[in-house]
Image (spheres, rainbow, N blue to C red):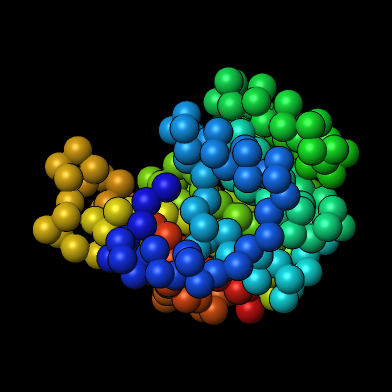
Amino acid sequence: MSNIVNDDINEFIIKNTRLDLSNDLMDLEVYALENNVPIIDKQVQNFISIMLKINIPKNILEFGTAIGFSSIFMCEQLQGNVEITTVERDKNRIIKAKENFKKFGYENKIRLIEGDCFENFEYLDRGYDFIFIDSSKSHYEKLLNNCIQNLNKNGIIIFDNVLYKGMVASDSLVVKRKKTIVNNMRKFLKNVVNDTRFSTMLLPIGDGIMILRRN
């Protein structure tokens, strides 16, 4: 989780944003922050909440389950009236996510696919209304090219962390060991903006999000 806007501005935005989370989900958020588990931050939560309530998707696909926070969050925002498929490869996080899905009573609403996302496309359904991608940043373009066939017309895809601590937007911020990720993300953003299959918008929310709507 990383914010690319001024800290004072970010704090002001958070103070002036209302987002209703259950007490259990707030506890899970605290757990994630205390244990360095990456989850969507407050600004991204609020944006996704609004997008879900506008689009009211019936089927959601997620890449990057972690401990299940975002899947549970989306389920709560839609009051459980949704089916979510989420993909995760980290074994320890898979165990924790399963525990959380059961704890929140969503084990029949959220299907967790274990393993590498590129090895599991054959197990995914077609016809998702909403796809949320928060996984390996170097593979965003490959993920898009693979999952487009699973997205309905007028469906939405949201990619998180696309400005990557601001490094994607400014060479002065680039850390040497992150150059490959940054270059791959820049290429992805350039290509997707020029992809006529989508209408797109890049927003400086959280660590940067790219929204795509399939034309």
In front of the other: 156 or 99: 99
Which image quarter: residue 152? Answer: bottom right
In the rendered view of the protein, which quadrant contains the C terminus? bottom right
In the image, residue 80 lies at what x, y percent? 84, 53
Q: Residue at x 82, y 40 (%)?
A: 106
In front of the other: 103 or 112: 103
Task: Give above or below for 84 relative to 11.
Answer: above
Task: Give above or below for 122 relative to 163.
Answer: above
Q: Residue at x 61, y 33 (%)?
A: 67
Q: Residue at x 42, y 54 (%)?
A: 161
Apparent side of residue 111 relative to residue 165 in the rendered image (left or right) = right
In the image, residue 200 lies at what x, y percent? 50, 76
Q: Is residue 85 visible?
A: yes
Apparent side of residue 12 relative to residue 99 in the rendered image (left or right) = left
Q: Residue at x 48, y 66 (%)?
A: 15
Residue found at the far left of this picture: 172
Apparent side of residue 141 relative to residue 63 in the rendered image (left or right) = left
Which image quarter: residue 92? Answer: top right
In the image, residue 10 lies at what x, y percent? 38, 65
In the image, residue 30 lies at what x, y percent? 54, 39
The number of callouts visible is: 0
Task: Give above or below for 205 relative to 140.
Answer: below
Q: Is residue 126 visible?
A: no
In front of the other: 48 or 179: 48
Apparent side of residue 147 relative to residue 98 in the rendered image (left or right) = left
